[in-house]
Image (tube, rainbow, N blue to C red):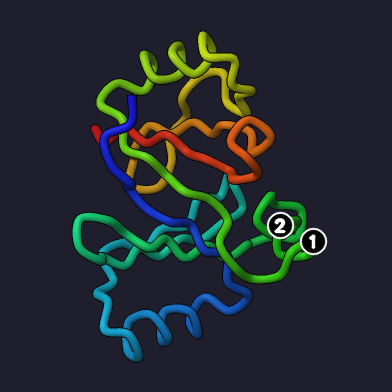
C-alpha cells in the first residue's frame, strides 16, 4: 500500500525561523509554500532527496497544529507515505483494523489527496497517506 516516505511534517513556532534553519543553515531548497485556511496552517515544503520536510505553523489558535504546539512544543508531527491510490489504501487500512482519522480523502497542501491514520494504530506516530494528482 505504501510506496515511499513522501514527507515528514515538523511543527514550528516561528515559520520564518524554521525556513531559515532548514534552508539557509542546512541548505534545503524551499519548493512550496501554502496557507490552508480550512486547516488553520501555513506549510513550507523543503526538498531533500526524493522526500520533503514540511514545516507547519498555525494560523489560528484553535487549529490542530496550534493544539499540537501547545501540548508538545515544536517537533515532528507526522510521517507521510506516498500511495498510488488513496481510496484503495484507506480500504486496506480499514480491512487491517487501523483507526482512521479521515474516513475519506481530503485536499491537502499542493492539491494532493490526503488522509490520516490515528497514532494509536501506528505505535504512537501520526501517519498520513498522500496521493499526488
Where disc 1 sits, the SS reads helix
* Residue assigned mark 1: 71
Position of the N terminus by quadrant: top left
Residue 59 x %, y %:
62, 62
Where disc 2 sits, the SS reads helix
Whether tag 2 and tag 1 are in contact, CB under 8 A, the answer is yes
Q: What is the residue that sits farthest to the right in this orientation?
A: 71
Q: What is the residue that sits farthest to the left in this orientation?
A: 49
Residue 103 x %, y %:
57, 18
* Residue assigned mark 2: 68
Q: Please give left or right for residue 114 compared with residue 12 in the image.
A: left
Q: Please give left or right for residue 119 compared with residue 55 in the image.
A: right
Residue 72 x %, y %:
74, 64
Position of the C terminus by quadrant: top left
Q: What is the residue that sits farthest to the bottom in this orientation?
A: 25
The residue nearer to you, when weighing 61 against 128, is 128
Mark 1 residue crowding within 10 angstroms, few (<14) / some (14–19) / many (20+): few
Residue 78 x %, y %:
53, 50
Q: Please give left or right for residue 108 compared with residue 78 in the image.
A: left
Residue at the spot 78% in from the left edge and 65% down from the top edge: 70
Residue at the spot 37% in from the left edge and 40% down from the top edge: 81
Mark 2 residue crowding within 10 angstroms, few (<14) / some (14–19) / many (20+): some
Spatial separation of the CA atoms under disc 2 and disc 1: 5 Å
Residue 91, image quadrant: top left
Residue at the spot 51% in from the left edge and 9% down from the top edge: 95
Image height check: is 124 above or below 100?
A: below
Amino acid at each position: 500500500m505504501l510506496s515511499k516516505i513522501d514527507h515528514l511534517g515538523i511543527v514550528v513556532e516561528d515559520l520564518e525561523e524554521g525556513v531559515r534553519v532548514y534552508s539557509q543553515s542546512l541548505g534545503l531548497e524551499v519548493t512550496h509554500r501554502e496557507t490552508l485556511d480550512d486547516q488553520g496552517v501555513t506549510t513550507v515544503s523543503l526538498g531533500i532527496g526524493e522526500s520533503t520536510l514540511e514545516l507547519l505553523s498555525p494560523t489560528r489558535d484553535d487549529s490542530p497544529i496550534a493544539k499540537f504546539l501547545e501540548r508538545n512544543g515544536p517537533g515532528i508531527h507526522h510521517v507521510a507515505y506516498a500511495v498510488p491510490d488513496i481510496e484503495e489504501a484507506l480500504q486496506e487500512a480499514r480491512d487491517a483494523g487501523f483507526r482512521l482519522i479521515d474516513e475519506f480523502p481530503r485536499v491537502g497542501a499542493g492539491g494532493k489527496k490526503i488522509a490520516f491514520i490515528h497514532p494509536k494504530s501506528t505505535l504512537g506516530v501520526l501517519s498520513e497517506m498522500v496521493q499526488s494528482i
